Image: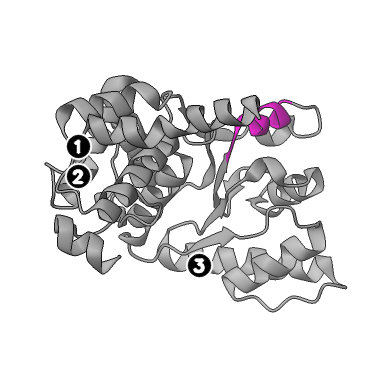
Amino acid sequence: MNSKLQSLYSLKFNPFRPDVPVEALYTTPAVDAFLRRVVLGIADGGYVMITGDPGTGKSVALRLLGKRLASLPDVVVGTIEHPQSRTTDFYRELGDLFGVPLHTHNRWGGFKSLRARWTEHIATTLCRPVLVLDEAQEAQTTVFTELRVLASKELDTRQLLCVVLAGDGRLIERLRSPDLLPLGSRIRRRLVLEYAGRDELLACLDHLLDAAANPGLMTTELKATLADHAAGNYRVLMNLCDELLAVAVDRDLPRLDEKLYLETFAQAPRAKSVAKRR
């Protein structure tokens, strides 16, 4: 964190950046209930899904889920970093994640090796390995189909993985298609994130400021104004706050208020008007 930012406001961290410590993230009751259900279902495996428009909290939910899974004994979590991969590269990434040497020219051998590794892990720990696929709407249909077959055993009566799919509304539509309906019908738990209400945005802002050790950083009026102009989007809210904080640091202001908001965000319309006159 910027030293000037810390000295001015005595913040533990910048509460408006994406890299906020996981323990400081705001958790809504709906997200908390979903995470508890996922943790309870780790022993059985299967599919869970998190969907929502950009800025509604998918990344936060995934980070919170990762923290809870990390606190469980013997749980192995692998995250797919390149969801657009073709099937061969998808196998390569799975092998790297779970420590299984694979030969790309022998997919059948890779199929058996991965299933053997997962089966051994389950027998030893009674926990399913977890595979997280973020931006899953970008994954190829062949990869989804391969994953469905790869992760099931004994005529689909046993699941070798707990698979977490996360994506926007396109993921829901894709899983309704005939080719992917067999996968979509296997999703056991779903979290559908909606745009936040004004009170939720204010609660998130208060929580972050408390966690960063400066609950008085913003006036009550400014927080209300920000919540009203964020369009229910957490990301928009954080971007507005981060821009105000940067301006406040530049001006050595002791606190962020509505006057700063008007001075900062009233400049863009004026600049646009000048451009039109030219």
Alpha carbon separation for disc pair 1 and 3: 42 Å
Q: How crowded is mark 2: few (under 14 residues within 10 Å), some or many (20 or more)?
A: many
Q: What element carries label 1?
A: helix
- Point out the tag, 2 or 3, that comes first from the N-terminus: 3
Left or right side of 265 for 252: left
- Spot occupied by residue 62 in the image (x, y as percentages of width and height): 44, 48
Magenta segment includes 275: no
Which kind of residue does numbered mark 3 sit on?
His
Q: Residues within 10 Å of mark 1 (few under 14, many from 20)?
A: many
Q: Which residue occupies 67% across, 31% down?
A: 170
Q: Are marks 2 and 3 in contact (CB under 8 Å)?
A: no
Return the mark for residue 209.
2
- Residue found farthest to the right: 105
Instruction: Provide the residue designation for mark 3.
Output: 121
- Spot occupied by residue 224 in the image (x, y as percentages of width and height): 24, 24
Between 209 and 162, the residue placed more toward the observer is 209
Q: Do the residues labelled 1 and 2 touch (CB within 8 Å)?
A: yes
- The residue segment tinted magenta is 167-176
Instruction: Provide the residue designation for mark 1.
Output: 206
- Spot occupied by residue 247 in the image (x, y as percentages of width and height): 32, 48
Left or right side of 168 for 192: left
